[in-house]
Image: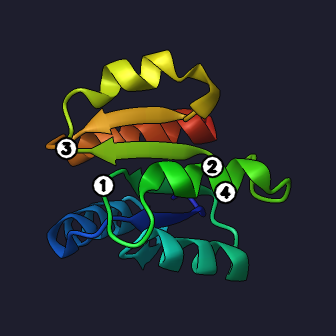
Amino acid sequence: MPDKKILIVDDEPDVRFVLRTALERAGYSIDEAKDGLEALAKIAQALPDAILLDVMMPKMDGFSVHQKLKENPAWASVPVVIITGKGYMKEFMELRQDLAVAAYLEKPFPVSMIIGKLQDIFGNG
């Protein structure tokens, strides 16, 4: 069983619930944030092993959160998986190589796909 802490950052409670349920079954420890500001506060309290980050959120979007992570040397190495419902984002991510995310998934995606991405990130896939 993986012994890794994952922070799920998404403003949709249903998305957080589905991801939490699947990832806990896979053995991950889960924390949640409903927006970017809450995510940064939780990251400051306890650094997760990986972050599942939605792009479109109130208060602070996913790109702003990701930028803050990269600006902080203590947080910069945490793998970030972008999860979004915006279809054009894949092209944007390819253009913005500086964003350096670990993976990118468009909603809806099967939860097995996110588990596979995490296994790849942690080297146990």
- Identify the disc placed on residue 56: 1
Given this view, does label 4 or label 3 mark the residue nearer the observer?
A: 4
- Identify the disc placed on residue 85: 3
Residue found 24% across the figure and 48% down from its top: 111
Q: Earlier in the sequence, mark 2 or mark 3?
A: 2
Disc 4 vs disc 3: Cβ atoms closer than 8 Å?
no
- Identify the disc placed on residue 71: none
Tell me the element at label 3: loop
Disc 1 vs disc 2: Cβ atoms closer than 8 Å?
no
Disc 1 vs disc 3: Cβ atoms closer than 8 Å?
yes
Residue 5, compared with residue 113, is above or below; it is below
Q: Whole-percent x and y of residue 105?
A: 31, 36
Q: Is 13 left or right of 102, judged from the image as shown?
A: left
- Residue type at the position of mark 2: Gln
- Residue type at the position of mark 3: Gly
Tell me the element at label 2: helix
Residue found 26% across the figure and 42% down from its top: 112
**Which residue matches tag 4?**
68
**Which residue matches tag 2?**
67
Q: Is 40 left or right of 54, judged from the image as shown?
A: right
Q: Which of marks 4 and 1 is nearer the N terminus?
A: 1
Q: Whole-percent x and y of residue 19?
A: 28, 62
Tell me the element at label 1: loop
